[in-house]
Image (cartoon, rainbow, N blue to C red):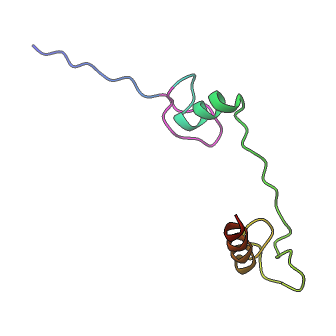
Amino acid sequence: MTVKIRKAAKPICSQDYCDEDAMARGLCRKHYYRLWRRGLLKTRPYHWQDGSCSEPECDKPSYARGLCQPHYKRRWFVERESK
C-alpha cells in the first residue's frame, strides 16, 4: 500500500494586486527583496511631466527626462562624448 502525500497549496503574496507565490513573510520574491533593501514596500514616486518636450519650440511628446526622443538622444550622446 502506498501513501500519497498532498502538497500544501502555496500561499499568495499579501500585497494588493499581486498574484505571485509567497516566498517569505507572506510576500513574493519581488516584494520581499524590496522590503529587505529599502525597508519599505512602497514604490518610488514617479515625476510626471506635462507630456511635451521641454526644449523651446518643440511640441513632440516627452520620451525621457522631459525631452522628446531626438532631443534626449542628442543630449545623451553629447554628455557621453564629453566624459
Q: Nearer the viewer, residue 55 or 24?
A: 55
Residue visible at 67% across and 67% down in the picture: 80
Quadrant occupied by the N terminus: top left
Q: Position of residue 82 (x, y in %)?
A: 72, 68
Query: Is residue 48 positioned above or below 22 on the image?
Result: below
Whether residue 57 sits left or right of residue 19 in the image: it is right
Q: Quadrant of residue 77?
A: bottom right
Residue 51 magenta = no
Q: Nearer the viewer, residue 40 or 64?
A: 64
Query: Is residue 23 positioned above or below 48 on the image?
Result: above
Majority secondary structure in the magenta region: loop
Whether residue 52 sits left or right of residue 20 in the image: it is right
Q: Residue furthest right?
A: 56
Q: Residue furthest front?
A: 83
Q: Position of residue 48 (x, y in %)?
A: 82, 61
Query: Is residue 63 positioned above or below 32 on the image?
Result: below
Residue visible at 72% across and 31% down in the picture: 40
Q: Which residues are magenta?
A: 11-23
Residue visible at 70% across and 32% down in the picture: 38
Residue visible at 51% across and 30% down in the picture: 22
Q: Quadrant of residue 47?
A: bottom right
Q: Quadrant of residue 83?
A: bottom right
Q: Position of residue 65 (x, y in %)?
A: 78, 65
Numbered label tally = 0
Q: Position of residue 55 (x, y in %)?
A: 86, 78
